[in-house]
Amino acid sequence: MLNDLKQYLREDKLKHILCSGCGHGTIMNALVHAIEKCQLDRDNTVIVSGIGCSSRIPGYLNFNTLHTTHGRALAFATGIKLADPQLKVIVITGDGDGSAIGGNHLIHACRRNIDITTIVFNNNIYGMTNGQYSPMTPVGSYASTAPYGNIDRSFDLCKLATGSGATFVARGTAYHVTMLTDLIVKGIANDGFSVVEAMSHCPTYYGRKNKLKSPVIMMEMLKKSALPLTAFEKLPAEKTEGKYAIGVLHHEPAPEYTKEYDRVIEIAQKGAN
């Protein structure tokens, strides 16, 4: 199995630059296992990222990869998918890259329902650029730009994606690796826009600034905070405070964008004749 997975890695680029204890490496591992399960053709798979800790990961993956500008991964990925709809396109983004500067691109990619799988590595902070708070940073948490505690309310990224029209939305964690792998497999299989929020942890900035003494403690927090959707839905609101649901949160097929676009081209060409 290990030898099978090595084909997906650029071994000459390893060791990676991720900090010790970072959850992003675990999520990358889940992605590689998911790709193996889906038996994706490396020559017909494109992995796109923006800027941030998670966005360095395509550099370690042996596919057609694109490391783009901050928040613009989905714009580049949309262009790639429209240019060649047969390609399997996967976007790797972070909570800052994907939901702040790239938030508008996320909303409209969901709305179009273009066949792209987006994995949001959510560690609740800007880890690469000195630990600023992000749209996902919990209220009261400390960051380099929130030395007295963050007062901005975070939003539910999965509810945003669902409300914007994504046809597959799921959430997993770096602790629940087997589940996360399966969720990515399902996201890749969905014929439309898929969002998989992968809850991660940043011991270097978020952990240090919030007095969480080790990556183990942060992993325990992921374990305790995440509840399977069926269990989450049965609990009263007071029992779910500070917790979130994991699993497939939304799956509702709809017409895929590149197929609809091809149909418009066909109609236009007939009209021209």
Image (spheres, helix red, strand yellow):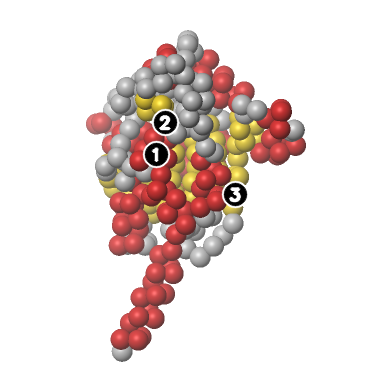
What amino acid is labelled 2 in the image?
Ser
Location of residue 173 with respect to 161 vertically, above or below: above
**For residue 60, what is the image quadrant?**
top left
Do tag 2 and tag 1 residues touch (Cβ < 8 Å)? yes
- Dot 1, how many residues are within 10 Å of its Cα: few (below 14), some (14-19), or many (20+)? some
Which residue shows up at 24% across the image and 31% down it? Answer: 12
- Dot 2, how many residues are within 10 Å of its Cα: few (below 14), some (14-19), or many (20+)? many
What amino acid is labelled 3 in the image?
His
Alpha carbon separation for disc pair 1 and 3: 22 Å
Q: Please count the marks in the image.
A: 3
What amino acid is labelled 1 in the image?
Ala
The residue labelled by disc 2 is 134
Image x and y of residue 204, in percent:
38, 17
**For residue 29, what is the image quadrant?**
top left
- Dot 3, how many residues are within 10 Å of its Cα: few (below 14), some (14-19), or many (20+)? some
Quick one: SS at disc 3?
Answer: strand
Which residue shows up at 44% across the image and 16% down it? Answer: 148
Residue 136 vs residue 273, the one in the foreground: 136
Counting residues from the start of the chain, the first of labels 3 and 2 encountered is 2
Alpha carbon separation for disc pair 2 and 1: 7 Å
Residue 175 vs residue 9, the one in the foreground: 175
Res 250 label: 3
Quick one: SS at disc 1?
Answer: helix
Image x and y of residue 157, in percent:
51, 40
Image x and y of residue 194, in percent:
49, 50
Quick one: SS at disc 2?
Answer: loop
